[in-house]
Image (cartoon, rainbow, N blue to C red):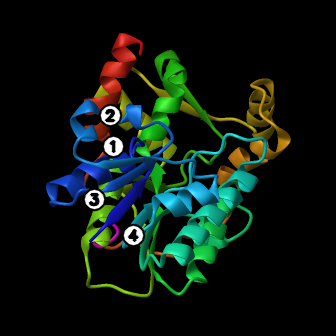
Amino acid sequence: MRIAVTTPTGNVGRHVVTMLLRAGVRPRVLLREPARLAPEVRDEVEAVRVDQYDADTVVAATEGVDALFWVNPTPGGEDPLADHARATRGVVRAVTGNRIGRVVFQSSVGAEKRHGAGEIDGLARTETALDGLGVDVTHLRCGYFFTNLELQLEALRAGTLQVILPLDQPMAWVAPRDIAEVAATRLLSRTWSGRRVHAVHGPADLTWRQVADILTAATGRRIGVERIPDDALRARLQRAGMTDAGVAAVLGMSTGLREDFVPEQPRTVRTTTPTTLAAWAYDHLRHRLADGT
């Protein structure tokens, strides 16, 4: 099986690559800068320079591929939803033009809403576009990444996380490596077909209060959490230079999922993955907080 992997240096993609290598597969990896690949990986993969927003290069890079792990790249333009739409056009053209029969797409909890969840709406539209191609596709509806906490290192060092979600609202938290394990299994398995949705929920639903307690115990630093008004976060994002469309996309990922939202896929043994936030924080976050990096 010829497998292509996008974002192979990302939080999930890099684990997908190494898992495929361990399974005996030499994946084709698609990325802007092949030099960013880890040195030990470069000779083990087929690296192709690709801009995922350029449909022509995506089509050329996926010629001869049987299965594709697709992740929309992190938006960098003024309108995140427009960036997701551009990425979607690329994967649609690649799948149809190269007759790729199997796709595993990294989506998100909340995409089932289809509208009203900020940037997650862009993932929902990619799901819908892939569904219309008549190929075998699995959408991974992932919970909140542990690694998102690395975007708030300064706040963690200061001892207080600020969020706009209710502090006692539970949600799924998941390790990117566990997402990669599900993705690699799906890519390698020949026992499924059609359209599938596979939620990846991590080991437990956690409230922000529970997260703060877990981080305190794992890192040895007293960490609290407080809820702030939507307008406070909006003003902060605007001061950082974010466009109105970008601000709406970021806010919507929280505001769209806090009022009576229930994930389409309930937590089951199939959606529950093993890595705990406590273990991840002890292994990955504790040192970063201590050394200031």
**Secondary structure of the residue carrying numbered label 1:** helix
Q: Is residue 200 left or right of residue 228?
A: left
Cβ–Cβ under 8 Å for marks 3 and 4: no
Q: Which mark is residue 181?
A: 3
**Secondary structure of the residue carrying numbered label 3:** helix
Is the stretch drawn in magenta largely helix, strand or loop? loop
Residue receiving disc 1: 277
In three-dimensional space, the C-alpha distance between marks 1 and 3, rounded to whole angstroms, equals 17 Å
How packed mark 2 is, by other alpha carbons closer than 10 Å (few <14, some 14-19, many 20 or more), is many
Residue at 54% x, 58% y is 58
Residue receiving disc 2: 281
Residue 171 forms part of the magenta stretch: no
Q: Which mark is residue 64?
A: 4
* Residue type for callout 3: Glu
Q: Which mark is residue 107?
A: none
**Secondary structure of the residue carrying numbered label 4:** loop
Span highlighted in magenta in the image: 269-273
Residue at 82% x, 37% y is 243
In three-dimensional space, the C-alpha distance between marks 3 and 2, rounded to whole angstroms, equals 19 Å
**Camera-side residue of 280 and 137:** 137
